[in-house]
Image (tube, rainbow, N blue to C red):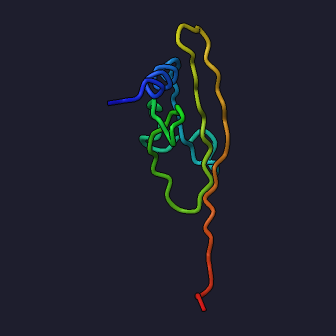
Amino acid sequence: MTPKHDIQRNAKVRLLTAIASVFDARRPGNRLPGAQKRLEPMLFAGAASYGNYFNMPGRASYRIELDIRRAGARDQIRIPFEFRHSLVTTGPRP
């Protein structure tokens, strides 16, 4: 059975629609194949959030655009940001 506070948080997270698009940052306007998805409501560590899975292989830089629209709103907002993979290498353990 889901606790009441989890149901309330889950209901609040459904108050908007979010779409994420992933682009190759080295080629402006070049969206990756299949890299536009609706972000689904979810609970993450007890907090209401949105998410989905994207294939972003290699050490490339990616530009991500989030398009967000609140329920009942006419306009949406777009939030662009850049994501870069960071690979941490460690030496041999003693």
Residue 70 point in image, percent of width and height: 57, 16
Q: Looking at the image, which residue is at 63% across and 62% down?
A: 86
Q: Going by the image, does 79 lie left or right of 36?
A: right
Relative to 87, say whether 83 is above or below. above
Q: Quadrant of residue 74?
A: top right
- In the image, 60: left or right of 52? right
Q: Quadrant of the N terminus?
A: top left
How many marks do you count on the picture?
0
Farthest residue toward the bottom?
94
Task: Specify whether 61 is left or right of 19.
Answer: right
Compared with residue 70, is residue 54 higher up or lower down, i.e. above or below?
below
Q: Name the foreground residue: 23 vs 9.
A: 9
Quarter of the image with the C terminus is bottom right
Above or below: residue 33 compared with residue 40: below
The image position of residue 63, as x and y in percent, is: 62, 44
**The quarter of the displayed image where residue 28 is located:** top right
Pick whichever, 2 or 83, lies toward us: 2
Extreme-left residue of the structure: 1
Q: Which residue is depicted at the point 49% across and 58% down?
A: 57
User: Which sits in the foreground, 46 or 78?
Assistant: 46
Task: Please give the name of the residue rendered at 45% of the width and 51% of the height, measured from the top-left corner.
Answer: 55
Is 90 on the left or on the right of 57, as rendered?
Answer: right
* Residue at 45%, 30% in the rendered image: 41
Asked if 44 appears above or below 1 in the picture, the reply is below
The picture places residue 54, in percent across and down from the top left corner, at 46, 46
The residue nearer to you, when weighing 42 against 65, is: 42
